[in-house]
Amino acid sequence: MTREELIHVIRRKRSLLCVGLDTELHLVPEQFQNESSPVRAFNQAVIEATHDIAVAYKLNLAFYEAQGEQGWLDLASTISLIRDKGDCLIIADAKRGDIGNTARKYAEAFFDTLSCDAVTLAPYMGHDSVTPFLGRPGKWAIVLGVTSNEGAMDFQFLTVDGGQHRLFEKVMLRVAEWGSVADTMFVVGATRPEVLAEARAVAPEHFFLVPGVGAQGGDLNAVMQCGMTADGGLLINSSRGILYAGKGDDAIPAARRAAKDLQGTMERALRAKGVI
């Protein structure tokens, strides 16, 4: 999905919603547990309930890799289900970070074999860990910028360049030189809106993938106020807050309601900003 196509989908669906399919087998509602593939069946139900208001889906690879062969089958089938909808960005949340032939093979795995549109990357090893993912029309490298976990303070906020920048700012500035706004995004956490605003100042035109809204406590309105651009500029992820919004027979209706509530708030902000 190209940048122009993504912006078009955001405007048409009036949404910045990214649904995180971080599905855990033991949390799959009971009515799906007797299916031959409970995770796939549950994911399909969630996709059917949300695809008209979601602009992206994010699949955290750890939740699938942990299930071995069945997990990889669930991953591939879920990607196919999303691809069949035709208008949702598919993100492999893999946080890969390696160099040389290994990086090239990761790019082939996620872009060619699995047919994902985007993959999350850890940039610690530098440009040769990121550039194999760039320059592919309609494909995206989503590079870790500044995260909202406690450990982010260990490295990301250290000052560099004689105190001119913090490390996360330096990373974002340098990565922005390698790609373009057409093939590079940044992961920016939702739980510290003031930091999101600072990240936006560093990368004013790039799309941000923003995890942390919902179960992690990020403030949706603050995120949009600090990070939205004239094109939308944000993919705001909610995983547990949608997947496990309800129980039993209400699981899928509740997931729809939770997603719709987020989309409604996003639509109002998009209108206020003049994006739609």
Image: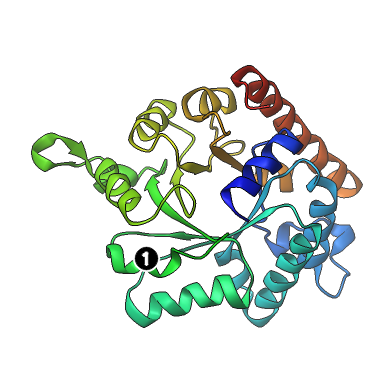
Q: Quadrant of residue 132?
A: bottom left
- Where residue 187 appears, x then y in whole percent? 45, 47
- Where residue 263 appears, x then y in whole percent? 72, 32
Task: Say above or below: 275 vs 179.
Answer: above
Quadrant of the rendering where the C terminus is positioned: top right
Res. 9 visible in picture: yes
In the displayed structure image, the side of residue 81 where residue 150 appears, left or right: left
The type of residue carrying mark 1 is Thr
Q: Residue at x 32, y 52 (%)?
A: 175
> What is the tally of numbered marks visible in this picture?
1
- Where residue 215 appears, x then y in whole percent? 60, 39
Residue designated by label 1 = 131
Q: Quadrant of residue 40?
A: bottom right
Given residues 50 and 28, the one toward you in this image is 50
Q: Secondary structure at mark 1?
A: helix
Q: Residue furthest left?
A: 162
Q: Residue at x 69, y 45 (%)?
A: 55
Q: Residue at x 34, y 49 (%)?
A: 176
Quadrant of the rendering where the N terminus is positioned: bottom right
